[in-house]
Image (cartoon, rainbow, N blue to C red):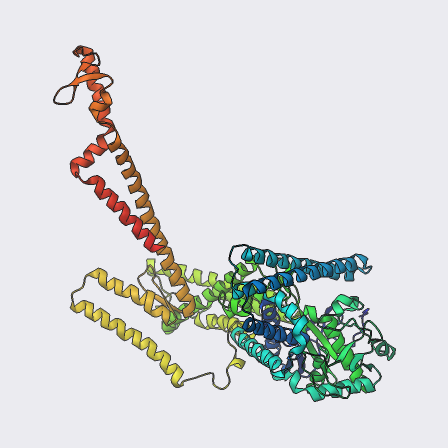
Amino acid sequence: MSRTREWFAPPGAEDGEAVLQFYNSLVDEKVPFIPASGAGSKQITWYACGPTVYDSAHMGHARNYVTFDVIRRVLEDYFGYNVLYVMNVTDVDDKIILRARRNHLVQRYKQQETDASKVAKEIEAAVQAAVSKQAKKQQAMAAQAAAATDSRQRTELEAAVKNEEHKAKQLQQVQEAFAALVAGGATPSIEAMLAVASDQLAEQLDAAHGSEVVDHGIFRAHAAKYEAEFFEDMAALGVRMPDVLTRVVEFLPEIIAYVQRIVDNGMAYESNGSVYFDTVKFREAGHVYGKCKPSSVGNATLASESEANFETSEKRSQQDFALWKAAKPGEPCWDSPWGKGRPGWHIECSAMASKIIGAKMDIHSGGEDLKFPHHDNELAQAEAFFHHDGCRQWVNYFLHSGHLEIEGLKMSKSLKNFITIREALTQFSARQLRLMFLLAPWNKTVSYGETMRAEMRAKEQAIKNFFQNVDVALREGEAKQSQTAAKWGEDEMALSAALQEAQVKVHEALTDNINTAAALEALSGLIKATNLYLAGKQAAAAAAAADGSSVSGLLPAGPQPLLLRKAAAFMTRILSVMGVLPGPSDTPGFGGEGGAASDAAGASYLDAFAMFRDEIRGLSKAKAAHGELLAACDRVRDDTLPQLGVRLEDRPDGKAIWKLDDPAVLATEQAERQAAAAEAARRKLANALDKKVKELDKLQKLAALPSEREALADRYSAFDEAGEPTHDKDGTLLEGKAKDKARKDLEKARKVREPLTKKLAEDPNALAAMEAEVAELTAQIAAMQ
C-alpha cells in the first residue's frame, strides 16, 4: 500500500495477520493493528495524554477519557491484550501558573480593597482593555486566514477566527452585564462586581503584580486540587485508572536529562537560559517534522498554543519550540544546567513516556486538538532523543478522539461554552453519558444536543427492557422447566440465528476501528429478535390456556431458558466490555461475594417484607375495609420496593412480576408520576374554579339587574300583587291582547333572572357560599404551585 506520509508498519501488519484495524492519525486512514512485540503477542504499551489540571474537567474531557477507556476495555476484555496503560498529569504548565497566580491575586485584591467605587472603575477599565485586546487579536487572525494559500490551513484558521468571534461576543456580554450592574444609583458590592468580571480584572492584576507571586506552594496547591477533582470525576464516569501515573514535578531530573541528550545529539540549543528544539537540524538529520498534522506546520497561531514565549528573537527558526524555559518572575522554577527554569509543555510527555515505555510505543492517544503542536512536537523530541538508536518512529499508532461540539463550536474552557462533568452528572448517569459517546465513531466530532441525548435515552431503555423481560421469562420458565416441552421449534431456531448474527456483526464492528455504534446496532437487532420471541411465546401460551391444549402431557412450550440465558450472557459480555455494565476487571477478587454487604442487602428486603406483613396483620385485626388492604399493597409497590431497586408490575392475569432497576431511576419515575398526578389534580381544581367563577359571575350580573317591575317600568305604570302589569305607561287599563302581551313581557323578564331566583330559593345565602367556595379553590391551587 503506497502512502504519501511516512509510516513504518509493524512486521505482519501488511501481511494479513492483523485482526483489528485502527484509524491511525499518522497516516489518516485505517491500518492493521499489530503490537510492536510481534503479530502473535498480546503485550501492548499505551501512553495517554492526561489532564492539564488548572480547572474543572468538562464534557469535552469526558468524551476523550471515556472514549479511550472504551477502547482500552475492548482491547483488554474482548481481544485479550495485556495493556500497560500510562497516563500523565500536567501539573507544571503556563495555564496552571497563570490561573493559580491570577486566582491568588484576585483573592488578595478582595481582602485589601474596600472602596466599591474604586473597584467599579478598575473593573470597568479592565473589561474595556480586554475587549480592545480581543478585537485586535480577532483582526490579526482574520487577516492571517485571508492570506493563507493552503486550503487545509485556511480552513483551520477560519475555524480559529470563528472561535475568536465567539470570545468577542462573550466579552461584549460581560461588558453589557457589568454596565447594567453599575447603572443603578448605588454602587454594587465588590462581590457582585467580581462575579461578573473577575477574569478581566485578574488579567490586569496579573500584568501589574504577577511577578510578586513567588510561593511555589500556590501553584502546587492549585494543581493538586484539580488533579484530585479530575480523578473523582473519572471514578464517577467509570473510567479505569491508569496502570502508571506520571507527574511533571516528580520527573524533573529525568526531563532535564532528556533535554540535555537532545542538545548533545545536536537537535536543540540554549539561548538566554532557555533551550529550544531545532526543527531545521532535526530535518537535516533525516527526520520528518509534523507527522500528525503536516498541514499545520508553519501555522504560528496553532504552534503558539500553551507557548507563552513562542514569538521570541531567541529562536533560530520560527518553528522551533521551547524544551526548557528560563525562569521568569511570578513562575515556579528549578535548577538546571542552563540556569533556573521549568520544562516546556511538550517535553514532559516525551520524557516520562520514554522512561516508562522506552524507544517504541504501540499506542499514543489524546484529543483531536493535541495533534499539532503537542503531539507532533512530542514525536520530534522522542526521535531526537533516540536518534542514535535509529529511531524514526517512536509511536506506531496515534489515536485522536473527535471534538465534542455545543452549538457548532468545540466545547472548551477558553470559549467558556463548557458543561463540567459534575454538572452533567446531575442530569445524566455515568452509564447514560457513556452510551451517548458509544453511539458515535470515537474519532469523529460529536454534537452535544437533544438529538444525541434522545437517541441515548431510547437505547438505554431498550437495553433495560431487554434484561428485565428476559429476567422475568427466566424466573417463570426455570420454575416450570421440568414440566415444559424443551424441544426447539421455529421460534427458537430464529432466535438462535439472530444471536449468531449479532455475534458476527459485533465482532466485525469491533475489529473495524472499534466501531461501537455498529456494535450497539447489532445488539439492537438481537433485542428486537428477543422481544418478538417472547411476544410470540406469550401469545401461544394465552391461546393454549384458552383451549387447554398440551404436548405429551407437558405444558405448552414457553420461552426456552437456556437460549434466553445465552442471549442475555452475550449482551452482558459486550456491554461489560464497553463499560456500560460492570466487568470482571472492575472488581478485584471474588467481586464482593458474601460478607456484610450481601447480608445487609438481604436484611433490607426481609425488613421490608416484615413491615408489610405487620401492616396487613394490623389492618386485618382492625377489620379494615377492602380498600385499605389494597392501599397497603400499593404502598409497598410504590414506596417501599422502589427504594430497594425493585419494580413491581401488576399484570392483567392478577399475577405481579418484579424487575430489578436502579433505585434512583425508580425514584425519578415515582417523582414524575407524583408530579403528573399533582398536575392533574391542579388542572381538575383549576377547571372546577373556572366553572365556579363563571357561574358566580353570571349570578352576580343577574343580581345586579333591575327587578321585573323595574325592567318593565318604561312600558307599564301599574302592577297587581302578583307583579303582573295592569296599566300601560300612559295609565290606560290593560285588556285583551294588550293584557296578554304584558304577561309575555313579564315572563321574559322573569326568565332572565330565573337561574338566580332558583338558586336563592334553594339557599338564600347561595352567592356568599359560592364566593367562599371560589376563595377556597383559589387557595388550594396556590398551595399546589
Question: Relative to residue 740, is residue 248 drawn left or right?
Answer: right
Q: Residue furthest left?
A: 721
Near-viewer residue (624 or 36): 624
* One can see residue 195 in this view: no
Q: Residue at coordinates 80% horizontally, 84% vertically from top-left?
A: 262
Q: Which of the 4 quarters of the picture holds residue 554? A: bottom left
Percent across and percent down for residue 321 are: 78, 75
Q: Which of the 4 quarters of the picture holds residue 131? A: bottom right
Up the image or down, 570 lies above or below 182; here it is: below
Q: Residue at coordinates 68% horizontally, 57% vertically from top-left?
A: 165
Percent across and percent down for residue 230 are: 57, 76
Near-viewer residue (224 or 411): 224
Near-viewer residue (348 or 203): 203
Near-viewer residue (301 or 280): 301
Q: Which of the 4 quarters of the picture holds residue 23? A: bottom right
* One can see residue 701 in this view: yes
Q: Which image quarter holds the N terminus?
A: bottom right
